[in-house]
């Protein structure tokens, strides 16, 4: 899997033109700059089909299911990779901004659990699953001492208002997986 930068704007500002961001992705991430995560070769990946997947995004105040075509590329080393924009968390059906908006409502206590379920059409276990992953990755990213200093609500706000592309790249280099990704990539 190769992660593509799409979120070069503040997450808060995109509210959420996911389709548009998705269409811009290939121009922003040309093949000649792409690095194979398996062998490290640069510019060697070539298009190799695609697959379709659903993504639940939050736009116009309600969740919406988008059908996206995810391109795949193959490197001469033999490995093929899905090209996944940074607003998609691997193995999750919900867009990253949607999860962060939901967690922002949760940690800031703007909404009750019931209110969150109704607004985002999610169930309670899913909210706690997102919360658990978020707190785990927050601690990994900040370290134990800074983690205790920065509230979950403040950190969510930082992610929504700062440069997500920069954060995501650094988090990926630190942990070798994407923020809020629940398990490792298979290769
Ligand atoms: Zn390779």
Image: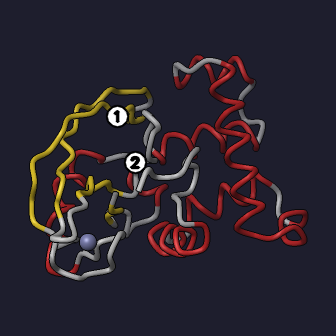
Q: Position of residue 9 (x, y in %)?
A: 39, 67
As displayed, is residue 170 above or below residue 130? below
As displayed, is residue 111 above or below residue 145? above
Residue to which mark 2 is pinned: 88
Q: Which mark is residue 55?
A: 1
User: Is 141 on the left-hand or right-hand side of 72?
Assistant: right
Marks 2 and 1: CB-CB under 8 Å?
Answer: yes
Choose top left, top right, bottom left or bottom right for residue 138.
bottom right
As displayed, is residue 75 above or below residue 14? below
Q: Secondary structure at mark 1?
A: strand
Rendering quadrant holding ligand 1: bottom left
Q: Position of residue 142 (x, y in %)?
A: 76, 70
- x 35%, y 27%: residue: 64
Q: Which one is nearer the viewer's eye here, 45 or 28? A: 45
Q: Secondary structure at mark 2?
A: loop
As displayed, is residue 128 above or below residue 157? above
Choose top left, top right, bottom left or bottom right for residue 182.
top right
Q: Position of residue 80 (x, y in %)?
A: 23, 57
- Callout 2: few (<14), some (14-19), or many (20+) C-alpha neighbours within 10 Å? many
Ligand 1 within 8 Å of disc 2? The answer is: no
Q: Which one is nearer the viewer's eye here, 76 or 171? A: 76
**Which quarter of the rendered picture does the N terminus lie within?**
bottom left
User: Is 54 on the left-hand or right-hand side of 57?
Assistant: left
- Callout 1: few (<14), some (14-19), or many (20+) C-alpha neighbours within 10 Å? many
- x 52%, y 68%: residue: 172
């Amino acid at each position: 899997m190769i992660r593509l930068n799409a979120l070069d704007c503040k997450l808060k500002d995109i509210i959420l033109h996911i389709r548009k961001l998705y269409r811009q992705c290939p121009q922003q991430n040309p093949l000649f700059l792409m690095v194979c995560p398996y062998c490290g070769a640069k510019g060697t990946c070539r298009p190799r089909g695609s697959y379709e997947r659903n993504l639940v995004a939050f736009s116009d105040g309600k969740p919406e299911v988008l059908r996206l075509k995810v391109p795949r590329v193959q490197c001469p080393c033999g490995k093929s990779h899905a090209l996944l924009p940074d607003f998609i968390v691997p193995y999750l059906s919900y867009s990253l901004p949607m999860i962060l908006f939901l967690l922002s409502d949760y940690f800031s206590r703007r909404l009750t659990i019931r209110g969150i379920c109704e607004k985002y059409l999610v169930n309670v276990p899913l909210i706690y699953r997102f919360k658990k992953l978020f707190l785990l990755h927050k601690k990994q990213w900040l370290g134990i001492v800074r983690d205790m200093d920065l509230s979950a609500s403040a950190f969510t706000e930082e992610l929504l208002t700062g440069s997500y592309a920069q954060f995501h790249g650094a988090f990926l280099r630190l942990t070798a997986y994407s923020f809020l990704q629940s398990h490792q990539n298979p290769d």
